[in-house]
Image: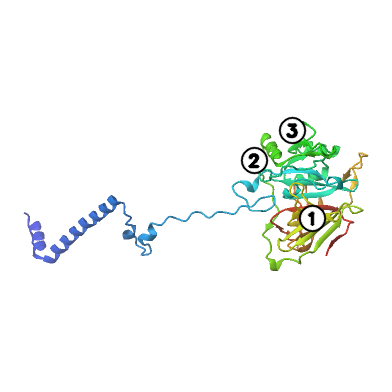
Amino acid sequence: MSNAKTKRAEIFFRHPRVLGTCVFCIFTLIAWVGVVRLADASRVKWSWLLNTSGTTSPAIADTVPDAPAIVAQYRLLDGMSATGTQAADWPAAVMIENLPSVRPQSGLGDAMVVYEALAEGGATRFMALFDPQISAAEKIGPVRSSRPYYIEWLGEYDALYAHAGGSPKALLVIWEARVKNVEALGPDGKYFWRDHSIAAPHNLFTSAAELRLALQTKGWLAMKASFLPWTFVDDATVDQRGEDGKSAEFNFSTGKSYLVRWQYQRPTNSYLRYNAGVPHIDNNTGKQLEAKNVVVQLVDPPELDGTGKGRLDIYVGGTGKAWVFNNGNAIEATWKKLSRTDRTRFYDSAGHEIPMVRGATWVHVVPKAQAVTYR
């Protein structure tokens, strides 16, 4: 052994502290390796031994991460809560007659949005929007013909359009705008039927099931709507609602046949419809028609469309005055619509969009010379 090696060995054996330290380190290393191997063998989580932050315990380390929060979904048509993919189901619009002789109509109680406007001879007609994948209406109608200004509202939704013919201008717009058309007087008549207990032409009907079949056959059932909805809010709390029993009343023409009244029900925060002074009911259910939002959109007086048939034309673009009734309140408003596909929106005096309460909305397009009262 060289002198250098002999000297290091002498230092090692002559100093017990050095020897003891080395022995301790060797045994500590052996023990640590054993612990790690034992942990691997038994699949026990020892991450708390390796943790340097001092904040994690074995119990916390074994917990499952929280599931992602479920994002609430709301239907585009009426703002109501939706499940799965139903928030953006493709809508269907149906033209429905409103002569006194055909009341009560079928299916209006299932509609999520309804437009009412003059059609001819002082009589109004409805365009009612449904979600055929949700509605259970077994009968919808009587189905009648189209007018061009209804297609202006239809363009806001790009909805399936169920009708029985139309004025020449309406049929031209339907063709030019490539409307998703379901024409009862053509090959699509298979989605409609005649109730022979009622005199024609007031006896044409469809149903939610037939509309759903039309959507499926034409390849639109699986498509998702992408129109921009109104702004929707929850019902106001009871103490923030208006006075029970107050009514919004207006008339589309002379006489009483098209006098409309909506009466507020504070407990349900909804309005019940009366037509010609009597409750307006759905013939399918026997229940009175009800809405969460009632809108009166004031427009310039209608003009004859030039066909000599007494049909009307109404300009529904641009801007004008309106009234919005919801939560028991009457809000003086301004309406705006910039194009056929632009959504008609309603703004308060400060220029803010007026939110709709979740649920059915009825929009009445009334000549601005007619009075609107709330009492």
Residue 38 relative to residue 349: left or right: left
- Please give the residue where the numbered disc 3 appears in the rendered image: 190
Name which residue type carries label 1. Answer: Arg
Query: Where residue 143 sits in the image (x, y, percent)?
Result: 80, 41
- Regarding residue 331, the answer to whether it shows in the image is yes
Answer whether labels 1 and 3 touch (C-beta < 8 Å): no
Residue at image location 76% in from the left, 64% down from the top? 329
Q: Report the Cα–Cα distance between label 1 and label 3.
A: 33 Å
Which one is in front, 316 or 252?
Answer: 252
Residue 265 position (above or below residue 186): below
Query: Where residue 372 sits in the image (x, y, percent)?
Result: 85, 60
Q: Residues within 10 Å of mark 3 (few under 14, many from 20)?
A: some
Q: Farthest left residue?
A: 1
Name which residue type carries label 2. Answer: Met
Residue 291 relative to residue 80: left or right: right
Name which residue type carries label 3. Answer: Lys
Answer whether labels 3 and 2 touch (C-beta < 8 Å): no
Q: Residues within 10 Å of mark 2 (few under 14, many from 20)?
A: few
- Please give the residue where the numbered disc 1 appears in the rendered image: 273
Q: In the rendered image, which quarter is residue 249 located in?
A: bottom right
Residue at image location 15% in from the left, 60% down from the top? 23
Q: Is mark 2 on a helix, strand or loop?
A: loop
Query: Where residue 69 sits in the image (x, y, percent)?
Result: 53, 55
